[in-house]
Amino acid sequence: MTLRTAVIGFGTGGRVFHAPLLAAEPRFAVSAIVTTDPDRVAAAGEYADADVLASADEVFARDDLDVVVITSPHETHAPFARRAFAKGLAVVVDKPLGISAAESRALAAEAEAAGVPLTVFQNRRWDGDFLTVRETLTAGEIGEVRQFESAFERWAPRLTSRWKDVATPEQGGGILFDLGPHLIDQALLLFGDVVDVHAELDRRRPGAVADDDVFLSLTHANGVRSRLWMSATSPSNRPRFRVVGSRGVLTSHGLDPQEPQSKAGMRPGDPGFGVHEDGRAAVLASPEGERAVPLRAGEHLAFYRALGDALTKGTPLPVDPADAVRGLEIIETARGAARCAELSRAVR
């Protein structure tokens, strides 16, 4: 069975992540791509059997599709998803699912009522370093986990005209909406639900209309504290992961290589895809010394492999929309906590 798929949006999400992954999973076909940008239209030529369309309206006017992938600006996620539900199409929404927890909760309920599969592209669950962290913690190699530190930082000190830089928080803009769903999702997968949130949201770049430098501290119900950093203005980065346990500390540096490899033209299945060229490893340190922990190969393709199974065999979807809703609830709690802190400072 071939699942004919339309990709709405062909920026980084569609061009670098979704389309190459879909093309690498034999059960999917990239049948339509929505973009009007001349450079992106040219890039879409890699998918010879795909129709390049000028608008999402053309997608929803068709009757020959099975799946819609929505990787357009955040505020369009819910409207496009609802149009897909009406056509009976399975839906993949790039994170965040919606621009509020309420909107996302409603989407999940509507998909269930319509009997339409809905999932969220939380590809960072399949980053190689995160897979390595999960495997090491499951093996109990650092003992009882006490602190989890996770940082996703880059150096982009000047604003651009990209929608992510000009959108307000109300439109789904800001780095908390962009990277927060990934980091929060990983923390929830490892340590379960959160009972307390502390947040520091800053705008560092001149003219910024949304946060571009964020710190979250999450207290999980099991007592673990997750400390999450996300920034567009970091000249030098923290470790990607640092996990402190009762018997040791696991540290990993650098971002997963799949995104830059895809941008450079590599594709899933190519030799070395998902593996750092320099052969780097995580380090497990304890009072007895240090040892290298080989990093697992990253495998974002596992998302679409699981989706293919769900749509053809009835297995569970790769990501439950309820997980995405919970992440957005935490983001909204974080925004509220940051506002309260600002008001408290203002009245002193």
Image (cartoon, rainbow, N blue to C red):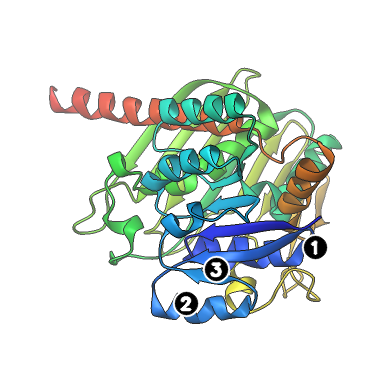
- Image side of residue 129 versus residue 202, left or right: right
Up-down: is 209 above or below 34?
Answer: above
Amino acid type at mark 2: Val
- Compute the Cα span from label 2 to label 1: 24 Å
Q: Nearer the viewer, mark 2 or mark 3?
A: 2
Which residue corresponds to the image point at 58% horizontal and 58% vertical from the top-left? 6
Q: Which residue is mark 1?
A: 26
Q: Quadrant of the C terminus?
A: top left
The secondary structure type at the circle numbered 2 is helix
Among numbered discs 2 and 3, the one appearing first in the sequence:
3
Up-down: is 203 above or below 27?
Answer: above
Badges 2 and 3: C-beta atoms under 8 Å apart?
A: no
Residue 276 versus residue 4: which sits nearer the camera?
4
Q: Nearer the viewer, mark 3 or mark 1?
A: 1
Q: Which residue is mark 2?
A: 41
- Image side of residue 59 versus residue 79, left or right: right
Kindly indicate the quadrant of the structure image that contains residue 112: top right
- Image side of residue 66 versus residue 237, left or right: right
Residue 113 versus residue 240: which sits nearer the camera?
113
Query: In this rendering, does residue 82 appear at all?
Result: yes
Which residue corresponds to the image point at 27% horizontal and 46% vertical from the top-left? 168
The secondary structure type at the circle numbered 3 is helix
Q: Which residue is mark 3?
A: 15
Amino acid type at mark 3: Arg
Label 3 Cα neighbours within 10 Å, binned few <14 / some 14-19 / many ≥20: many
Which residue corresponds to the image point at 49% horizontal and 42% vertical from the top-left? 81
Among numbered discs 2 and 1, the one appearing first in the sequence:
1
